[in-house]
Each structure stands twice: as structure tokens, then as C-alpha cells.
Amino acid sequence: MRVQVAIIGSGPSGLLLGQLLTNAGIDNVIIDRVDRDYILGRIRAGVLEYGTVGLLDAVGAGARMHREGLVHDGVSLAYAGVKHRIDLKALTGRSVMVYGQTEVTQDLMDLREATGGKTIYNAGNVTPHDFDGRPHVTYEKDGTTHRIDCDFIAGCDGAHGPSRIAAAQNGMKGFERVYPFGWLGVLADVPPVDHELIYANHERGFALCSQRSNTRSRYYVQVGLDSKVEDWSDDAFWDELRRRLPRETAEAMVTGPSIEKSIAPLRSFVAEPLRYGRLFLVGDAGHIVPPTGAKGLNLAASDVHYLFEGLRDHYLEHSDAGIDSYSARALSRIWKAVRFSWSMTQLLHRFPDQGDFGQRIQEAELDYLSNSAAAQTALAENYIGLPY
Ligand code: FAD
Ligand code: DHB
């Protein structure tokens, strides 16, 4: 097979890039190691920046999001038993959209199918080759090795995929911070405790009240790295969550059986550069952020925006300026989101080595935030998403 762009990975970044290319008449194929149902079974992000919403609209995948998604004009920080609302809309003129990554992925998969996009699922041993010369991707399926020749390879295959590995073998520099805790997340068909999200700082650890709809909630609590999902009954989770929230919030909480429960470790990672000849790293393949600022999925979308502009200009305007500047443009925005996610993580979690001094610094920063319009504006500007 020969295509213009071979995309490794059928997560949000691969699907969004594929659709932008298809709509522009640029031939592409997506190759993933698992199948559609497996991908749709992964419960991940829930908050979309206005830029991500705009991109989904631009490719024609926004209709269900606007019908079923929840527009949030504010978000709350809770500490010392009190909730402080940050009015995103009043401070920035923008809102965010609460709509799950699973739904985004499903809408993009449906659109790809409807517009005749090619996808190869259940491909084994997917490998990018010769991206400085004649780029191609090989994979195994049904006992045979297949080869796809292409002009460019988009590595949209997440943190553990073959694109990051290829980059590491070709001079990539990685910048990393590992945090000494994880998030235990629970999804449950119960009404959300608040109409907006609550990020809580508590002496027992961080907690987050999020949601997927008016009848489905997503909650998280900070846990130690040695914590295992099996150690947490539903009752133990709800008890711990309630302890970390302001009293009136805890009392309003409706609980029920969990429909998903998982632990995610927290980590920051950035790969530099994001381009290796004709191979590009996109989304989680190029960077990981701790979930505290809700930036992972949104960064994947902004990478796609920059790479698509470069590929479009290559094919339609005969200019390589956009491809040549992809890595620098994307990294400039990525590092700001990495900084924001790191600072929100720093502000809201209990660190084992925090000490009394660290604790007072956190309290001072939270107090400053709840009383300063300037500090709230800075947080709001980053939360709704920096401009592309
Ligand atoms: P992915 O979604 O990882 O997609 C990569 C695709 O590549 C997958 O379909 C995978 O099957 C495929 N792939 C992998 N290896 C291979 C291979 N060898 N060959 C072929 N294909 C391959 N972000 C938030 O903002 N909020 C959250 O609450 C949040 N929670 C998260 C929880 C977890 C457990 C994880 C892992 C991430 C979470 N994120 C969260 C981050 C967010 O989900 C990611 O940033 C987002 O999925 C990135 O999209 P992507 O398309 O770049 O990568
Ligand atoms: C969700 C996850 C986040 O990391 C976040 O900051 C907000 C919401 C969620 O899964 O709903």
C-alpha cells in the first residue's frame, strides 16, 4: 500500500489528524495495535478547551458534543473546608466543554467510517522505518508482514508506542518529572455533586469532583504509589472522597456502585525535538502531563492543529515552512501546559516531603488565588487553553 501520510495510533490525536487530512483530500491510513472497542473502553480525560471544541467543529465531528456536552463557565478550588469559584467566563470570555474522551473518540471513529477513511486495527509489531530516506511502516496481521510506503509518518501512538522508541534511538532528549503519588478514579452513574468541577486540597490528599453528564460522575482521590485498585472497595473510596471535601459538598454527595475504577500514576515528560526527518511525534507520543490541569487530550489536539497546517501547506501550497516549524511551534505551547499542569499538581497535592514550610506556601498561594483577580485570571487563561 502507498499513502501520503501513515498515522500510527487511533487515539484522539491520530483520528483528529486523519480527519483533517481526509477533509483536505490528503490520503492517509491509521494503524493501531488494538481494536475499536478496546480503545473506546479506556476511560480518560473529560474537559475540552475551546480550541479543541473548535477543531472538532472544524472537522465536522462536533454535533453530538454540542447536544450532549456540558458547557462550564467556572471551576472551584476547595481548601480549608471552603469552596472558591473561579469564574472562567467572566475572567476570559471563554468556557470549557465537559465531554468525555471516549465520546470524542467515538464521534471521530464514526466520522472516519462515514467518510471512507482507512483504518487497520489489531496490527502487530507496528514499526516506522527509514524516516530520513524513504519512509515506510511495517506491521503484522493474519500471519503476514505488510508494508505501507508514505511521504510522512505521524507518530500518534501514545507514550509507549514505536514512534517514541524510534525517536529515542535517533537523538531525542527527554525531560521528565515523576510525582510520588497517583490518582484513583471512579466512574459511577450518580448525579454530579456540583454543577461544576471541584479541585480540592486537603491534608489527607487531593480530590477532584468531575462529571461526564448530569447522571454520570467521575471522581478522583490522590493515592500513594503502593496503592492497588483491589485495596479500594466502593465504600472505602466514597468515604475517603467525602473526607477531603468541604462539609456541605460531602453531605450533598450521591454515591452508588462504580462502573470503572483505576489508578493512574502522575508524570511530566517532554520529548525534544518532535520531528525526526519525516517522522513526527504527536500527542502523548511526544509528551505526558499530570492530569491536574486537564491538558493531556487538549495538547494532543493543538499538536494536530500545527502538524496539519504544515502538511496542508506542503501538499497544497508547496511550502515546507509549516513542517519545518512544527516542532518549535508545538513545543512552545506544550511547555506552557507542562508548566501549568506541574503548578496545579504542586498547588493541590500532599507531597511526602512537603513539610510545614511547603504546606504554608500552598496555603498562601491558595489564599492569594481566592482573593486576587490577577491570579485568578492567570489560572483561568491557562485552564480554558492558551491560544494556538
Ligand atoms: P492515546 O490516546 O494514548 O492513543 C494512542 C493510540 O496508539 C492508542 O489507540 C494505542 O492503542 C495506539 N498504540 C499504542 N502502541 C501502539 C503500537 N505499538 N502500535 C500501534 N498502535 C499503538 N488527560 C486528561 O486531560 N485528563 C485525564 O483525566 C486523563 N486521564 C488519563 C488516564 C490515563 C490512564 C492515561 C494513560 C491518560 C490520561 N489522560 C488524561 C491523558 C489523555 O488521555 C491523553 O493525553 C490522550 O489520550 C492523548 O491522546 P493520543 O491520541 O495522543 O494518545
Ligand atoms: C477530569 C480529569 C482531569 O484531569 C481534570 O483536570 C478534570 C476532569 C475528568 O476525567 O473528568
Image (cartoon, rainbow, N blue to C red):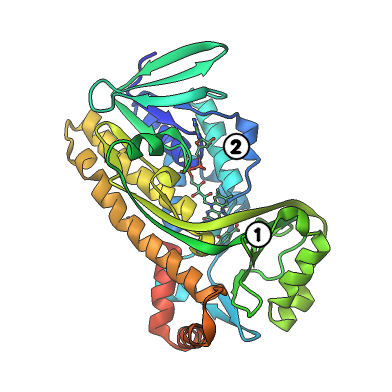
Q: Is residue 370 visible?
A: yes
- Residue at 72% x, 54% y is 229
Ligand 1 within 8 Å, label 1 CB: no
**Residue 387 appearing in the image:** no
Q: Is residue 331 left or right of residue 296?
A: left
**Camera-nearest residue between 332 and 26:** 332
Instruction: Characterize the local packing of mark 2: few (<14), some (14-19) or many (20 or more) Cα atoms within 10 angstroms.
Output: some
Residue 160 image point, x, y percent: 48, 40
The label shown at residue 39 is 2
Look at the numbered disc 2 and say if its residue's Cβ is closer than 8 Å to ligand 1.
yes
Residue underneath mark 1: 226
In-front residue for pair 242/60? 242
Label 1 crowd (10 A; few <14 / some 14-19 / many >=20)? few
| Residue nearer the viewer, 204 or 308 | 204
Who's the residue at 17% across and 40% down the image? 321
Which circle's residue, 2 or 1, is located before the other in the chain?
2
Return the x and y of residue 289 as percentages of the image width and height: 46, 57
Amino acid type shown at disc 1 = Asp
Identity of the amino acid at label 2? Ile
Observer-side mark, 2 or 1, equals: 1
| Gap in angstroms between the C-alphas marked 2 and 1 | 27 Å
State whether residue 234 is above or below residue 241.
above
What is the x, y in percent for residue 286?
38, 46
- Near-viewer residue (92 or 1): 1
Q: Is residue 44 left or right of residue 276?
A: right
